Amino acid sequence: MTPPELETPALDTARRLAESGDLDGSARILAELAADPGHPDHAQAAVGLAVVLQELGDAEGARAAARTALATGHPEFAAQAACHLAGGFERDGLTEQARAAWQAVIGLARADYLPVAHLALARLAGDPAEAERALRETIATGDPDFGSRAAQWLAERLLEDGEPGEAAEVLLHALRTPGIEDAARLRVLLGLAHLELACAEFAEAVEESPEPETGALAIELLARTLPLRGREEDAERVWAYGLEHDDLDLAAEVRLRHAREL
């Protein structure tokens, strides 16, 4: 007989069975452990059972096992269980249930699970304001991967909404995150935000400048920058505004700038 100290732990046996393809055998062991609230591996076994039952196509059984693990409040395995529930609900198109499961992940306050939960809530948000809050919370976790994704998503939305200053602040904050992923993409978006801000400043200068030379320079800069944002028609209107201006000195300056090659 094998001495007790040399016996293989049941969890390890269940894991090996699952890895070898014997999911039913693994499920039987895990179900026994998960059914015993006093067992030290109770929470971990319940999570494992949820995964195995999902592989076996028993979605309801998998959810029941995940709920068992979640109810333990275990700092790691309850969070894993909530993530498992949330992912399953999302796959089945059960948005409200998925949102509740991701909120449960956040409620467990397990730092390494917060970024994925916040980003998921942004994806499932019912309105733009809710999505923005979730994206900002994702960035605030300081996670270099999920934070980068959230910053890109939020910055693109802000640029579409005509808020380049806000977009720039979001991107600068993200770029200060140690080890941030996809920094090049963040910097491209930051450059686009700065282009939008530049266009706004040039437009203000066109309206405010009393001097033909400064006004013409602002018109040229605005007209040559707008195409970089895909706004060729707006650029043509700016040139036309300058070329047809009532101030003949300004119009002459613009004509010279319009004709030159860069």
Image: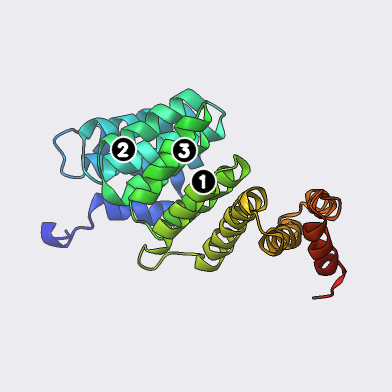
The amino acid pointed to by label 1 is Leu
Choose between 191 and 109: the one closer to the eye: 191
First of labels 1, 2 by sequence position: 2
Choose between 46 and 236: the one closer to the eye: 236
Identified at 56% across, 59% down, the residue is 194
Name the image quarter holding the N terminus.
Answer: bottom left
Q: Is residue 180 visible?
A: yes
In the image, residue 26 sits, relative to residue 171, either above or below, namely above
Q: CA distance from mark 1 to mark 2?
A: 20 Å
The answer to whether residue 73 is left or right of residue 121 is left
Circle 3/circle 1 CB separation < 8 Å: yes
Q: Tag on residue 106?
A: 2
The amino acid pointed to by label 3 is Glu
Residue wearing tag 1: 154
Identified at 73% across, 56% down, the residue is 226
Q: Tag on residue 162?
A: none
Secondary structure type for disc 2: helix
The answer to whether residue 205 is left or right of residue 140 is right
Choose between 246 and 218: the one closer to the eye: 246
Residue wearing tag 3: 132
Percent of width and height locating residue 22: 45, 49
In the image, residue 228 sits, relative to residue 100, either above or below, namely below
Name the image quarter holding the C terminus.
Answer: bottom right
Q: CA distance from mark 3 to mark 1?
A: 7 Å
Percent of width and height locating residue 227: 76, 58
Dot 1 crowding, Cα within 10 Å, few <14, some 14–19, many 20+? many
